[in-house]
Image (spheres, rainbow, N blue to C red):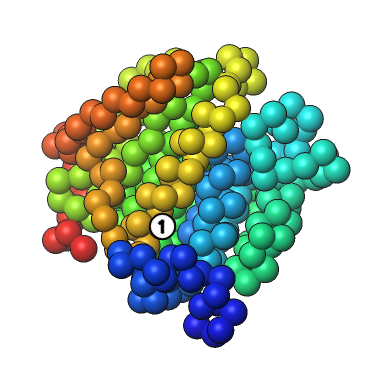
Amino acid sequence: MNDQQLLRYSRHILLDEIGIEGQEKLLGARALVIGAGGLGSPVAFYLASAGLGMITLVDNDTVDLTNLQRQILHASDRIGQPKATSGKQAMLAINPEVQVLALQERLEGARLQELVSASDVVLDCSDNFATRHAVNRACVAARVPLVSGAAVRMDGQVSVFDTRRADAPCYACLFPPDQEFEEVQCATMGVFAPLVGIIGTMQAAEALKLVAGIGESLAGRLLLLDARTMEWTSIRVGRNAHCPVCASASTPSPP
């Protein structure tokens, strides 16, 4: 690190858990952020400000006035712009040293697998089950840890799915792809603005911990937040031995 980096990241470096070695891991890491909306906004800001070296931000939507109540990555003068491009502008404004690849596309198939395989951590900030399951399958196949978040109305949830660990479940263990779940989205049900900030910030924290190799991740735990009372519920989740996604995946020793 140069002198400017030592100064910029000094508050991280002062932490025994991170130090210079941990910060250098962040500087050399690659993250894939899927979704530049309510959850993706704090994720993108904190990954960039923390100095995560290469961030690929993917979103196929454009900035709309209705987004600005909670999607703090964007601004009124960028209405109509691609969210990925708008997000890149905001990220580089807070930290011009990070590399940001902005992609206005919907990831699927081989393209999704390619980007997941090239990443050290994936953050799912999408808003639908189809995308979440596709991302999960790609992460299991590539053995890349997945940080998943969701928020709608006054309820949020966050977890880590890291099948590099033999005991850790994948997203499909918790939400089997062959079961019916109610698809609730902010556009029809509404969402409490700070809620996405809380959940997205926790996603960013979990991703930074995974990359730096510090603390204990949320793998095997699902945190649920009721913002009406600001009460958290922690649920232990085990790997499903019959999961159609991860049951046959190879599971090397924990990293």
Q: Is residue 194 visible?
A: yes
Mark 1 is surrounded, within 10 Å at the Cα level, by few (under 14), some (14 to 19) or many (20 or more) other residues, namely many
Nearer to us in this view, 135 or 211: 211
What is the total number of numbered labels drawn onto the structure image? 1
Q: Is residue 111 visible?
A: no
At x 51%, y 61%, the residue is 50
Element at label 1:
helix
Residue furthest to the bottom in view is: 2
Q: Residue 219: x and y, percent?
A: 26, 44
**Is residue 233 positioned above or below 240 on the image?**
above
Q: Residue 72: x and y, percent?
A: 67, 40
Which residue position holds label 1? 208
Can you say which quadrant of the picture contains the C terminus? Answer: bottom left
**Is residue 56 positioned above or below 9 on the image?**
above
**Is residue 120 positioned above or below 138 on the image?**
below
Residue furthest to the right in view is: 77
Residue 118: which quarter of the image?
bottom left
Residue 12: which quarter of the image?
bottom left
Residue 91 horizontal side relative to residue 242, left or right: right
At x 68%, y 50%, the residue is 87
**Is residue 135 positioned above or below 11 on the image?**
above
At x 75%, y 38%, the residue is 63
Residue 56 horizontal side relative to residue 25, left or right: right
Residue 17 horizontal side relative to residue 122, left or right: left
At x 44%, y 62%, the residue is 119
Residue 178: which quarter of the image?
top left
> Tag 1: residue type?
Leu
Q: Residue 254: x and y, percent?
A: 17, 59
Q: Residue 67: x and y, percent?
A: 70, 31
